Image: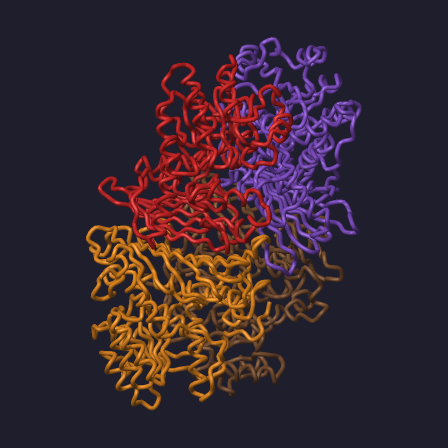
Chain colours: A red, B orange, C brown, D purple
């Protein structure tokens, strides 16, 4: 059951990491910290953990940071750390969306690698500017579209790329949740409050928060690019300012002489779904299905043969999955491991940078391009819905 | 484990049944015969089983029909049987779609009850005419939208009607299959040949053959009526004349002060799906999911509580399911039982007619209205797709 | 989707059938009638439906029997029907267990085929006598170990017989239910009352009622014969006279130079299990799993390859399953269809008898031998448990 | 979706950890390191990573250990580290079983906490001596029966303890795997070689390697203690020295006036099972089922109600699961998180020791007692099997 060459063991000095946002009680900050730690590639050494000074300080203390490296603002952190001999080499940005752009800018321009939560920014203009900045910077920009870190998502992508599904015809994506079924933003639920607030989240509600994940995943696995979409967005909960449900039809760009179609459904008002991300891809030779809640399984049907259950690191599971797996088949890996894979892929790229080496082409992580695509997706959804579902190019 | 008052036992003299179509080797003809027989409400006594006289005769012999009641045409059968003292009381029409209208007309106008396979007709004008005929006739017209016969579909409908889901917001329907992934109509597969031929099937391919089932089921369970739709249809297999995939967005008519939305995906080119009909309904208080391939289960989540698995005749399964069930929970019933439920519901209505009694309001079966709605759905899909997905009223 | 040569169409004059037991309200009687009717091989023409004359008469009326062929006792029916020109050719015996032997005897000795519910009898001596009678009679004796009628059970058996699993090492059987979790026999539940009464059921409770099914299925699929067993039986519900749970370890007879082992668990006090019959077989080359509640699926893992889901009539499903299937893959068949397969296999054997022909070797149904084996299994369980789990030969 | 009071954040100075065994390429060593790191409670600072000096040195280098704290033997490490001012406070022992006792002894007697892989030792006398040592030591002894770290296992235990299942009647355990289906130990597979070698593994093969896990889990969840067992062990693969399959019947000690029964099946020759640990518990009021491969789900059926799917941190999931969870429901946690929970529970107990405080009674981890029970279980299995399945007290 030994896994040779497992990705879990550091071979290099750990990367010094800072964090923006993620103070005590923040869900995604804790996730980023575990993800950074899991494979031992990072060491958290600095933070601007909250916009509230008291909370920042308290959070830093709880995390065992050197008090001198707990900052009152991301800007201060960027300036100071850039000057330190052993300053941070990378920063994780885990704030609400509207802070992403300003924060990333400060670090990118100082050559500090950025690992940023998604969506990329809260506005499309910010996203375009950030893309430009990232391209001009020598530092890496990594977006935590974490679901692409799941081994069986990598397996699916590899199978499509290898032609095992033939020419792709259909990409069906869905991401239903139920936590916003009722108006909890009005009663003080913090996560709900900022995620349903256009000034913090941007133009998309469910489309931005989860639709982008589903869209990113569909493209990641299928290798296709979207051409245009038609969307019907709703805010089912009275008074809600952003969409809480989206129905989207998609047309992909031509590839291999064929034009695939797709559908995407994202919802935060679908009782019974905790976090129901699912992607299905169908081609001329076979079909695939992957469900986030059961991430170690990939259902694969070669057309005309029985359906097969491929398990992470099990029979039929290939190199792309193995390099981001830690334990043998039958020992489930989960959300944190998938998230950690993004961090560890980034680490491998950062090591290469450190060493002036070319990054291994097998390294895969979401980039600023993926982030911009997500923003364009949200924008197109909103535009199309305003135009009563007219097809909008992305 | 005894089921009191089970629906499975006849209490009346069996109904004399004729059949149009359904000669040897026809899949759906055999299904109708089993469905008619299962609960012992019918006796097959006459047939116009094939347009080929030899095949009609041979099929009649195989089925043990009296040779004098094996007819060369449905018209001949209608005329003769109507005059017989013990002539047929009902007829099953199981031909390709383009024959439905002409055949149904002959029987309806002679007061013979019609049980007709779906879709209603191959053209919309025929459908409208048939609706008129059915309304004018004293005879019953029953459409075998068989999936509404499944007990747990009835259970789902009952739960929605009882308000257990609150106000409905979303109806997500899908019906993927894979049997037309390749161009088998060109190589002589008979089922594929007529189903992909506009002159026999009508304007819809997958939309007519299976999309109508999904649409009918979504409306049946949710109790909603469609207002308009936007569709994107494809014929992925080169040379195919009818759609083999459809993506549809839906807006339902206002009900309880709210307007639900929906999506429907039907496909015959999705490898890995044999007969993947699924319907999911979400309201303000809960969600439901039913999958045809596992028909004895209904997944129900009251918002904020754990998901529950309701099984046919098991705990939590109510009266609507029980009256169309035969065996205890844990003893699966299937497709034929569901199909038979349509026949048996029809029989109960026919018994009432015989007795000059009012039919029990608990009796439910698909009518000519459902058939016309299906035709309008197909027509709207085709129109919308031609207009690049414009919203079309139904 | 057409199934050529489907088993569902009668080619012969229907078999005249009588029934012993199965009056109104009896679960298993209704099941037998549907099973007989489903494929149109039988016509119910006579009955001794209840030991109560009024109930017998009323039941006969409800079923539409000619009153002159509704009898007060099975003996009267056997005597009279044997003399009629168009008397019954076969009889279904669906009484509680203790009546099986006496009833079967009367028909077998008059050359009337017997289709008998399981277990074979209520006592082992009766079972041995019945076996002798059945062997001496020219009539067929068919035992409705109905679970062997499921197509995917046939598929599993065929795969094992073809060597696809290699040499069998393990047969794991289980059959948990929960309906006797509480003492419902004391409060008048009729099914519970006779099934927990040794004078009607025999020496085994759960072992006889459901353990025999699991045991029969394990042997049927694996092709193995039991050599000895060690059992630990319990009556968890205070006051219950027969076992309601059994743990059994098994050693099979040597085959192919190897000795397989097995375990069997049957229980009627396991909350959450409605009818949880499951069988798993493992060999040197692969493993199989079949679950009664989802009977259209067979899980097959060739060792070292991904697990495969074989569906009834789908890809990978072979001849043994196809000949007892009616509808295409994706259209689930259930308990009644599996039960009907026993009746229809019997019908094919009876047709051969009628015609003086040799029965097709592909015809498979449970025999008096299977019934005796079941009785010996129950007896061995009871003996072993009394001896504190000592190994007992069967 | 924020989880208040999540267990994932360190509040104390990290515990200095050493490791015995676990050099490069060892599966379980890497697992322990991740588990120690995940919640940031430990810092790996010393190691005796291999009995081969070169491999030890190389492994230490790869893990970034200070070379002066990479030792040639565990004894050397224990002696030296005990004298260092900042020497290790705890040690992880991850060698093959026969080394556990000697290694643990050296650390325990120097007051260094021991976190030891299971089974406890390779011989029963060693196990008894180790229990004595652990009891005499002020240091903690923690056994990584890691499956008890899964949140939904904790949930199950809590529900049983709260009486939600009523009086327990049945505990059904199974742990099938397939990786030893063929004789891979002869062809140099290292994991297989030592695990099938009595001198390294002890008297039990599958019973020791995985049966102990299933047994531990059954007792952990049910709260019951075993009284006696009857076992039938096999070595199906020719030439194999230890059991590769075990069938076990169990009788538990009386509790609440009732005596529960159980079955346990463990196998390493069951094709199709990667790591199929499953436990089911049934009481007078309900039943539970948990499957390791899908660890975020717990199936719960209150008798007479629909089955419920309780998800980790979802509706119906309580305090015991929440305190060892990191992320919201719908975001799966896996094997490493469960394993880390053992480490983190140990850390909380070590913090209490440090602070001279009483450990929070909510802290739960497997102890030397559990380890000895596992050894007694293996011994009883072997003894019973030698005596042809006679009941053996444990």
Residue drawn at x 27%, y 82% as measured from the top left: B106
The picture places residue A125, in percent across and down from the top left corner, at: 37, 36
Name the one closer to the observer, C345 or A200. Answer: A200
Relative image position of residue B257 (x, y in whole percent): 48, 65
Q: Position of residue A226 (x, y in %)?
A: 31, 42
Residue D134 horizontal/vertical position (percent)? 76, 25
In the displayed structure, does residue C208 sit left or right of residue B88? right
Residue C304 in view in this figure: no
Residue at (52% x, 84% y) in the render: C61
Query: On the rendered image, what quadrant is the N terminus of chain C found in?
Result: bottom left
Residue D10 shown left or right of residue C297 in the figure = right
Q: How many marks?
A: 0
Furthest residue toward top: D68
Quadrant in which residue C103 is drawn = bottom right
Residue in view at x 45 percent, y 28 percent: A104
Q: In the shown orientation, is residue B193 left or right of residue A386?
A: left
Question: C264 or A333: which is nearer to us?
Answer: A333
Residue drawn 66% across and 13% down?
D77
Query: A86 or B94, which is in the foreground?
Result: A86
Q: Is residue A374 above or below residue A87?
A: below
């Amino acid at each position: 059951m030994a896994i040779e060459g497992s990705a879990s063991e550091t071979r290099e000095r750990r990367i010094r990491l800072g964090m923006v946002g993620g103070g005590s009680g923040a869900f995604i900050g804790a996730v980023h910290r575990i993800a950074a730690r899991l494979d031992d590639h990072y060491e958290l050494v600095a933070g601007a953990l909250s916009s509230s000074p008291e909370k920042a300080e308290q959070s830093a203390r709880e995390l065992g940071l050197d008090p001198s490296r707990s900052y009152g603002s991301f800007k201060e952190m960027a300036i100071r750390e850039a000057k330190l001999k052993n300053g941070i080499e990378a920063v994780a940005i885990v704030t609400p969306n509207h802070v992403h752009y300003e924060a990333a800018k400060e670090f990118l321009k100082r050559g500090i690698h950025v690992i940023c939560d998604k969506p990329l920014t809260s506005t499309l203009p910010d996203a375009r500017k950030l893309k430009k900045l990232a391209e001009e910077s020598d530092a890496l920009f990594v977006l935590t579209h974490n679901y692409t870190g799941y081994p069986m998502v990598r397996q699916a992508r590899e199978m499509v790329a290898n032609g095992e599904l033939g020419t792709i015809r259909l990409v069906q994506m869905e991401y239903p949740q139920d936590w916003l079924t009722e108006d909890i933003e009005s009663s003080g639920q913090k996560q709900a409050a900022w995620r349903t607030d256009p000034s913090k989240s941007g133009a998309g509600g469910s489309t931005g928060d989860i639709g982008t994940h589903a869209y990113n995943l569909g493209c990641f696995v299928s290798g296709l690019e979207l051409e245009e979409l038609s969307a019907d967005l709703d805010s089912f909960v009275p008074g809600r300012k952003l969409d809480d449900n989206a129905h989207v039809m998609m047309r992909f760009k031509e590839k291999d002489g064929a034009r695939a179609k797709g559908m995407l459904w994202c919802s935060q008002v679908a009782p019974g779904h905790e976090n129901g991300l699912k992607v299905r891809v169908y081609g001329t030779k076979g079909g695939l299905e992957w469900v986030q809640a059961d991430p170690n399984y990939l259902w694969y049907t070669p057309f005309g043969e029985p359906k097969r259950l491929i398990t992470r690191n099990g029979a039929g599971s290939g190199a792309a999955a193995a390099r981001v797996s830690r334990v043998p088949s039958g020992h489930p890996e989960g959300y944190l491991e998938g998230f950690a894979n993004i961090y560890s892929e980034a680490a491998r790229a950062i090591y290469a940078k450190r060493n002036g080496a070319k990054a291994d082409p097998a390294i895969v992580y979401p980039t600023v391009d993926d982030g911009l695509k997500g923003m364009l997706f949200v924008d197109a959804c909103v535009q199309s819905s305003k135009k009563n579902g007219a097809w909008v190019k992305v």
